[in-house]
Image (tube, rainbow, N blue to C red):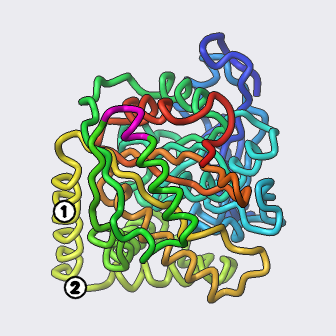
């Protein structure tokens, strides 16, 4: 699909997750049954229209995990998208297709969505930059919903400058408060691999040095834990059932087993007493307030995205479930609190491995996050430690 105008994105190729409205096209939403049971869009999503009018073109539509409801990259149509960084491992989901296309050089920008980690996880898995913006910063009109309270439109790229250009087109620049503190986990080794926690500390130290900010330690487990992960999972599942319950009920037999299991859980959770559901909403509000308090005073938190490398393509169902659960602990904070989170790829010069490290900041600090990352990231490619 050709550009409709010229601007800051001239010549950039987009790989678009196949859940965005394109006039005359029937989105796959990650499953052929969705195509069979839905009509073509009558309009193009405004977010795509703005990118096209700024000079970008759509190189192609990209695969995604079924209903955008997975973070592995294995539950979509046909063969799973290739992870060029680690061909023997999954690309991460649910924006696996856009990430695969960018990592392979088939596109310059991956346009996708992030609800519980679907931009951040593929970015970390494939050695890319990835931005989950502040919730609500970029409109989601013409984008199929998963869980609207957490759904965001995000982007993937092989260099930070391209992400900055996309953000400039899609979101009005806001003057964020200058960051004064860089917060790093004091308990990183307890929840992530030695290589991952080492990369997180290296990024935090480099960021503090380059910006003159104070380096402060906090206990990661206070916010990145199984309770927060399951809270996100429960609220998300209810919202998915609210958005798609009739379709899921009619088609649950054709879904991947893990997606079907989450759908059934969503149905069960939606049938729970209203008091229990209000309890989850209250816990969500409290968590958001407490995380906001921890980040007050213009702080940026440096966090893991994955515990270790993405799972092997030969991983068992139990191993994939463990990957999902451990990863949700890291992605839950930004999702629950609607905060912006930027993933930067870090290459370990000794081992050659690529590790995704996340920068998370208060709501509305999207441009400030990108500006901060530019202090330590190279013009092209990954940061080396």
In this view, 294 is above or below 232:
above
Q: Residue 191's x, y, as percent?
A: 44, 75
Q: Is residue 170 above or below residue 155?
A: above
Q: Residues within 10 Å of mark 1 (few under 14, many from 20)?
A: few
**Residue 285 tag number:** 1
N-term mark: 2 or 1: 2
Location of residue 255 in the rendering, given as x and y in whole percent from the top left corner = 66, 77
| Residue 44: image location, x then y, percent | 60, 33
Q: Which region shows up in magenta? A: 207-212
| Residue appearing at x 42%, y 77% in the figure | 190
Q: Is residue 105 left or right of residue 272?
A: right
- Which quadrant: the N terminus? top right
Disc 1 on helix, strand or loop? helix
| Residue in view at x 37 percent, y 40 percent | 208
x 63%, y 84%: residue = 319
Q: Residue visible at 53% across and 45% down?
A: 143
Task: Tell which tag, 2 or 1, sits nearer the viewer.
Answer: 1
Residue 136, visible in the rendered structure: yes
* Residue placed under numbered mark 2 in the picture: 273
Q: Residue furthest top?
A: 6
Q: Nearer the viewer, residue 327 or 30?
A: 327
Q: Are dots 2 and 1 in contact, CB under 8 Å?
A: no
């Amino acid at each position: 699909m050709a550009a409709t105008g010229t601007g800051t994105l001239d010549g950039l190729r987009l790989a678009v997750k196949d859940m965005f409205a394109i006039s005359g096209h029937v989105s796959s939403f990650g499953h052929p049954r969705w195509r069979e049971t839905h009509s073509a869009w009558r309009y193009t999503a405004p977010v795509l229209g703005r990118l096209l009018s700024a000079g970008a073109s759509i190189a192609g539509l990209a695969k995604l995990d079924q209903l955008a409801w997975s973070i592995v990259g294995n539950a979509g149509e046909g063969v799973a998208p290739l992870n060029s960084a680690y061909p023997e491992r999954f690309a991460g989901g649910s924006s696996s297709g856009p990430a695969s296309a960018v990592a392979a050089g088939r596109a310059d920008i991956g346009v996708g969505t992030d609800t519980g980690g679907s931009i951040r996880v593929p970015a970390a898995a494939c050695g890319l930059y990835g931005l989950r913006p502040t919730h609500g910063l970029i409109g989601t009109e013409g984008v199929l919903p998963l869980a609207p309270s957490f759904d965001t439109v995000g982007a993937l790229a092989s260099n930070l400058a391209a992400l900055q250009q996309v953000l400039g087109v899609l979101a009005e620049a806001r003057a964020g408060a200058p960051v004064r503190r860089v917060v790093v986990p004091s308990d990183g080794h307890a929840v992530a691999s030695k290589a991952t926690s080492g990369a997180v500390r290296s990024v935090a130290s480099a960021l503090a040095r380059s910006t003159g900010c104070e380096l402060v330690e906090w206990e990661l487990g206070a916010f990145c834990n199984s309770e927060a992960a399951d809270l996100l999972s429960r609220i998300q599942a209810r919202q998915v059932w609210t958005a798609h319950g009739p379709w899921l009920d009619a088609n649950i037999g054709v879904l991947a087993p893990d997606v079907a299991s989450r759908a059934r859980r969503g149905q069960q959770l939606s049938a729970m007493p209203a008091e229990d559901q209000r309890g989850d909403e209250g816990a969500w509000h409290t968590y958001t307030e407490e995380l906001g308090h921890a980040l007050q005073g213009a702080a940026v938190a440096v966090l893991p995205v994955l515990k270790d490398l993405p799972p092997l393509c030969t991983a068992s169902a139990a191993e994939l479930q463990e990957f999902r659960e451990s990863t949700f602990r890291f992605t839950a904070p930004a999702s629950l609190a609607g905060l912006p989170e930027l993933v930067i790829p870090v290459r370990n010069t000794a081992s050659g491995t690529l590790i995704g490290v996340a920068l998370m900041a208060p709501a509305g600090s999207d441009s400030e996050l990108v500006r901060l990352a530019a202090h330590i990231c190279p013009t092209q490619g990954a940061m080396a430690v």
